[in-house]
Image (cartoon, helix red, strand yellow):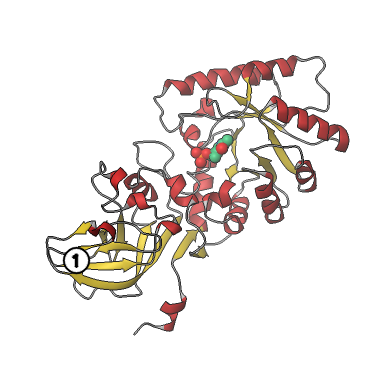
Amino acid sequence: MLSSEFLSASNRLTIDLNALADNWRSMNARSGKARAAAVLKADAYGLGIEGAAPALYAAGARDFFVANAEEGADLRPLLPEARIYILAGMWPGNEPMFFDNDLVPVINSEEQLAVFMAALSERGDHPCVLHVDTGMNRLGLSVEEAVALANDPARPASFSPVLIMSHLACADDPDNPLNGYQLNRFREATAAFEGVDASLANSGGVFLGSDYHFDLTRPGIAVYGGEAVNDVANPMKPVVTAEARILQVRTVASGGHASYGASARFNRDSRIATVAVGYADGYHRSVSGGGVTLRQATPSGAFGFLHGQKVPHVGRVTMDLSLFDVTDLPENAVRAGDYIELFGRHIAVDDVARAGGTIGYEMLTSLGHRYERHYVGAV
Ligand SMILES: *Cc1c(COP(=O)(O)O)cnc(C)c1O
């Protein structure tokens, strides 16, 4: 019999706000003389801003970055006193959102500068951030444009950025020479804006050392417990644990198969747990144990964690369901209704990501809406 609790309860995300706060404090300490902001874009990397934002504010963060003005407007009521920066900047038509919600636009281009200046002349003073591209080639004025702007005698007195920023392309790879190149380019730009705070480092940049810290750092993934630097042990605490429920345990005789394409094949009598999670929950099809053509080069798929043991995913991840081979657990140990950990305390989110050829950032921001979210820990 299934209990009524099982019938009503869904998969769950447990979000440890103490670990989140500890990770932010750790990144703030690693930022040395600089203060650490927190990056809350994409609903706090999938964790949910309602839980994450107040916890980070309580930990001491006062500067917050989000992707666009809509995210900023959602964040403002949660953080009435914080400084909220909008990475995508201001566009014709969304200027009121910045003034109404006290949001600081990042100016990413000459066009955005013109939009911002026009808005200022209409509405009066407002802070902004100047983004300078130093090698990422994604957003920002060129260093030359920024220096020219700083030295332009016709520059309006009302244009006074509170921050000059740039973004590193290879911060996860400490030996990459592009890091030093970008640092030098950024120094050329900041020299032209004396007295203005500067910000270069994302999570990986914080680990590159004090040269990269300037006045404000912008850690995201490390605060959420993910890997910021390639090929070194991750020092952060896991924040998110994703667990899904087992719907059924079935046996497949040796020589049998399971899943679409009969892609899981068994050479021993096997017990297979059918779990209520799939790619619609961000458990990407590419983490499948087998049968995914484009991923044949990767030797194995993801593992789950169940009753103290790692168990392999088998066959293909489907929209709502996944199969795990639980044959190595004691018979009768696994029951319908049990939770299997997909990632979190025992399985690193980045290990699951690697099995699927992606990164922890994408796993977290793909979680979707079908999990019950449990926030634990004090705010
Ligand atoms: C997302 C983002 C960050 C945070 O990056 P992490 O690698 O998650 O630390 C910092 N700065 C900018 C401009 C970003 O877009």
- At a point 62% along the width and 43% down the height, the residue shown is 67
* Outermost residue to the bottom: 1
- Left or right, 266 with respect to 276, comes to left
- At a point 50% along the width and 34% down the height, the residue shown is 206
- Left or right, 268 with respect to 29, comes to left
- At a point 68% along the width and 53% down the height, the residue shown is 74
For label 1, the crowd category at 10 Å Cα-Cα, with few meaning under 14, some 14 to 19 and many 20 or more, is: some
Q: Nearer the viewer, residue 6 or 235?
A: 6
Residue 108 in sight in this render: yes
Q: Nearer the viewer, residue 246 or 306?
A: 246
- Left or right, 228 with respect to 96, comes to left
* Quadrant of the drawing holding the N terminus: bottom left
x, y percent for residue 204: 47, 35
What's the residue type where badge 1 is placed?
Thr
x, y percent for residue 250: 24, 72
x, y percent for residue 46: 52, 53
Q: Quadrant location of residue 95?
A: top right
| Residue marked by disc 1 | 327
